[in-house]
C-alpha cells in the first residue's frame, strides 16, 4: 500500500484516484460547528480551528470531513470531532441527524455561499456543544473560541475559508440568534 | 392572596380565574421528553413520570407545563425539568428552540392526537438529554426509564395520558428512529 | 355585546378584558412570511404589508395574528392570510406545522429580537408561498414585494415593526439564503 | 462512448465503473415523497411508483435518485420528479433544502431502516406536494395514490422496497401525523 493511500473505511484510494473522483461525483461531507453553551443551552462561544490551508497563508475553519464508505453519519461526525478537537473534547452529538442546513460546496464559486476548489461536496451541517478540553491536532495550529458577535464580525468572517463564515451565520440564525 | 393562587410570573391567578381562562384562550405550554443518550448521541432510554392524574388511577406522563407571563421558553423548559426531575437531573437544553413538533391539545378529543380536558394548549415539544440523577418530585410517584422499543410498546403507550404516547412516537420518528 | 367585543372562537372578549389578559398570560400567535417562489421553489420576493401602526406613522409588517380558543394553528394561519392578503391570494400552507422559528415577543425590548408593547406573545413563524393575487385588506394600505436582498436592506429593515425585520432575516437564513 | 455509459452531469461513467464506485464511496441521493394536499396543506394522499425491481417481482417505491457532479440538490430533485412523474406533475419544491430526514442506505441490512444492496447512499428526503397530472415514465408501471392510513398499512408497507415504507412513516410523523 502506497504512502499516499487514504483510508476510506472498507477500501482505500490512492490520492490521485480520490482527486480524480472528486471531479466526477459529489462527495458526502459533515460539517460541525463546535460551541460552548451555558447551563440553559445558550451558545456562549463558537470554536474555530486555525489552519494553514492548501494554498498557503492562514485561515479559520470549522470541523469538516468526508463520510467514508459504509460509515454512519453519526460515526463520521464523531471521528472528525475527535480528529480535530482531540480525545478530551467530549462533544455532545445531536439526537437527530437532520442537519440545520445542507451546505453545497461547488468547485465553481458563486453558485452557493460554499466553495471548495477541490470538489463538489454535499455537507450535512450540525451544531455540536463541546464540554471538554479541546486541543489542536495535526494540521491545526490552534483552536480559538469566539462569542457569537465576534464570530460574525467582518474580521473573523474574512479569515474563514470555503464559506465557513456563512455556515456560522446560518447556524446562529437557525438557533434564533441574529448577530 | 388566597392559598389557591398560582404564580404566573409577574402576576397571580386565582385557581378559578385560571380555570375560566383555560376555556377562553389557548395556553402556551412546553413538553419535554427526557432521554438518556450514549456517547454517540443515540437515545438509549426515554424517561416517564408515574403520576396519579386528575381523574384518579395512575398514568405515565412526560415533563409538561405552562409558560408564564414574561417567561422565556428556555426558562420555562428549565423550570419544569427542574420541578419534575429534581435539581440534580442536569438536563441538556437544546441550542435551538425550534420544537420537533407542536402539540395542539384540545379539550375535545379526536381533533389531534393530543387531548387535555381542562384546556386548549399549544405546546412546543423538545427532546432533552438528561445526564444526572433524576428524583421524582411532588405529585410524581416515580420516574422510570424505558428503551425506545419499550416506550412505544402497547402496554406503555396505553398507560400514557393526554396523547403523550403519540408525542414519544413522534419524537423518536423525528430522530429517524422508527419503533 | 359591545361594539368593541372581539371574536375569540368559542368566546368573546371585551377589548378591555383582552388588553388586561395580555398583561398576564403569554398569547399564542402565528406569523406568516408571504413569498413568491419560482418553479424550483426558490424565493424570488418577500411580501410585506404597509400599515399605519398603533403609535402613528407608517410601518411594514408581516402577516401576524392570534390563535383563537379551540382553533387549530393551521386554521389560524389560513384565517390571517386570508384576512391580510385577501381571498384570491392562494397561499400554500406548509405540510408540517413545525415552525422555522419561534418568535418570543416581549413587552420589554431587548430580551429577544421581537418586541410587542401590548403583550407577551409566543409566535410560531412560517414561510408561506403565495400563488395568487394579493389585495391589501382593512388596515393595510398596500402589499409590496421585495427581493430577498431588498428585504434585508437597511432601508426596508428599519421600516419594519416589532422585530419583523429580524423574522425575515431568520426566515431567509433558514432556507440557506444568507443576505 | 459505450451504450451503457451513464450521464453524470459534467462527466460520464461506464456502468461497470459506477458499480465499482458504489462499493467504495457513499453516493449522494435525494428521495421525494409525492403528496396531494388539500387547500389547508393537509396531506390527503401519498404517491407511489409501481416498479419491477432489480431482483424481479413488483414493488412500490418513492421518487429517488442520484445527485450528479456539479448538480444542485434542488435541480436533482426537480430532475428526478420530472423523470418519474412526468412533465405535467407540477411539483412544489420546498423553499428550504433542510430534509425532514437523512436516510442512510447501507448494502448491509439492519444498520438503519434503509437498505440498498447496490450501494451506500446518503439520501436527503423531502415531502413534495404535487398539483398536476402524474404519468408513469420509463420503468414505472403505474403511479398510485394512497391515503396516509393506507400508505402505512401492512399490505402497502410490505410491498415497498429498500426501506421506503419506513421513509413514508417518518415523513408523516414529521408532519405531526401519526398513523
Image (cartoon, coloured by chain):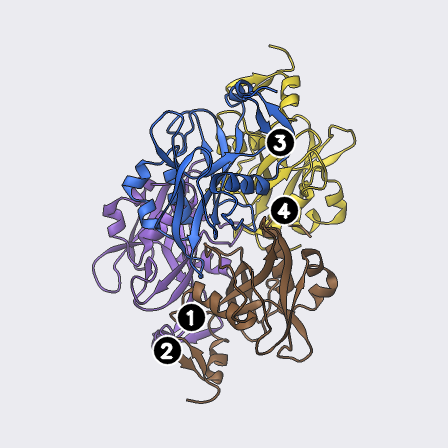
Chain colours: A blue, B brown, C purple, D yellow
SS under mark 1: strand
**Contact, mark 3 vs mark 2 (Cβ under 8 Å):** no
- Separation (CA) of disc 2 from disc 4: 44 Å
Q: Nearer the viewer, residue C142 or C101?
A: C101
x, y (%) of residue A112? Answer: 40, 33
Q: Which residue is mark 1?
A: C7
- Separation (CA) of disc 2 from disc 1: 12 Å
Looking at the picture, do discs 4 and 3 lie on one chain?
no
Instruction: Residue at the far right: name it.
Output: D57
On what subunit does the disc labeled 1 rest? C
Q: Nearer the viewer, residue D149 or A138?
A: A138
Looking at the picture, do discs 3 and 2 lie on one chain?
no
Q: Is residue B177 visible?
A: yes
**Contact, mark 4 vs mark 3 (Cβ under 8 Å):** no
> Mark 4 or mark 3: which is in front?
3
Q: Which residue is mark 4?
A: D45
SS under mark 3: loop
Q: Mark 2, residues whose alpha carbon is within 10 Å: few (<14), some, or many (≥20)?
A: few
Q: Is residue C35 visible?
A: no
Q: Which residue is mark 3?
A: A9
- Separation (CA) of disc 4 from disc 3: 41 Å
- Separation (CA) of disc 1 from disc 3: 63 Å
Looking at the picture, do discs 1 and 3 lie on one chain?
no
Q: Which residue is mark 2?
A: C17
- Separation (CA) of disc 3 from disc 2: 66 Å
Looking at the picture, do discs 4 and 1 lie on one chain?
no
Amino acid at each position: 500500500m502506497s504512502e499516499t493511500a487514504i483510508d476510506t473505511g472498507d477500501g482505500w484510494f490512492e490520492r490521485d484516484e480520490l482527486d480524480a473522483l472528486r471531479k466526477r461525483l459529489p462527495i458526502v461531507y459533515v460539517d460541525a460547528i463546535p460551541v460552548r453553551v451555558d447551563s440553559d443551552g445558550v451558545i456562549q462561544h463558537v470554536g474555530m480551528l486555525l489552519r494553514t490551508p492548501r494554498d498557503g497563508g492562514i485561515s479559520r475553519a470549522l470541523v469538516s470531513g468526508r463520510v467514508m464508505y459504509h460509515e454512519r453519519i453519526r460515526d463520521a461526525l464523531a471521528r472528525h470531532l475527535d480528529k480535530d478537537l482531540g480525545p478530551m473534547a467530549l462533544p455532545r452529538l445531536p439526537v437527530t441527524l437532520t442537519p440545520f442546513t445542507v451546505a453545497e460546496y461547488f468547485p465553481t464559486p458563486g453558485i452557493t455561499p460554499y466553495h471548495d476548489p477541490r470538489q463538489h461536496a454535499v455537507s450535512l451541517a450540525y451544531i455540536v456543544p463541546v464540554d471538554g478540553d479541546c486541543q489542536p491536532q495535526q494540521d491545526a495550529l490552534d483552536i480559538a473560541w469566539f462569542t457569537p458577535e465576534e464570530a460574525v464580525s467582518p474580521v473573523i468572517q474574512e479569515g474563514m475559508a470555503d464559506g465557513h463564515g456563512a455556515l456560522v451565520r446560518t447556524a446562529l440564525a437557525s438557533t434564533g440568534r441574529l448577530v
